[in-house]
Image: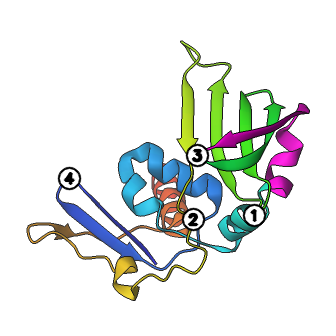
Amino acid sequence: MFAACKEGMFTVSAVELDIKQIEQLQQLGFGDVASRFVTYETTAVISDPYGALKPRIKSQSYKGKETVGGVECHHLSLSGDVADSELWIGVADLLPRKLVLTFKNREGGPRLQADFSDWNLAATLDDNFFTFVAPKDAESVEMVTEAQMKETAARMAGQHK
């Protein structure tokens, strides 16, 4: 299910999205909605981050053990074409504890730091978390599918001959 609300209008449609499509939705300003999608592809990335990231890693090194937030961690340094990263993974539980990304090809070399703590691997979410509720003053609009767009374009091209 995809639900999006922007500029006083909303649409709801059954769809499956992959990671790239979710990123596109975020770029269009639907990040709050896009971040709630979990499809097979996104689950694979989450459940096997090494498998998803390995092709992007050009070099890596082990920096030793360090303590982050009171937790003993393995410190890894990874380099790729888009970003360099430092990653700290808990020795005992193998959970990420800290991530620092430095983007290479962006003006100013922006840096992102994420600290991870208080892991709850048995968390539950209420089903209502995934329920879309449109704002009172929003107007429902129909979502046009790619097939409908192609059909309309072909029909219009035929009319202009």
Which of disc 2 and disc 1 is earlier in sequence?
1
**How many numbered discs sit on the rendered protein?**
4
Pointers 1 and 2 in contact (CB under 8 A)?
yes
Tell me the kind of residue under disc 1. Answer: Asp
Q: Nearer the viewer, mark 3 or mark 4?
A: 3
Which of disc 4 and disc 2 is earlier in sequence?
4
Q: Few, some or many C-alpha atoms within 10 Å of disc 4 (few <14, some 14-19, many ≥20)?
A: few
Residue most extreme to the left: 137
Query: What secondary structure is marked by label 1?
Result: loop
Residue most extreme to the bottom: 127
Q: Which residues are magenta?
A: 50-68
Give the residue at mark 1.
93
Q: Is residue 67 magenta?
A: yes
Residue most extreme to the top: 108
State the residue at coordinates (21%, 62%).
Answer: 9
Query: What's the mark number on residue 69?
Result: 3
Give the residue at mark 4.
7
State the residue at coordinates (52%, 49%).
Answer: 24
Question: Above or below — where is 129 with respect to 57?
Answer: below
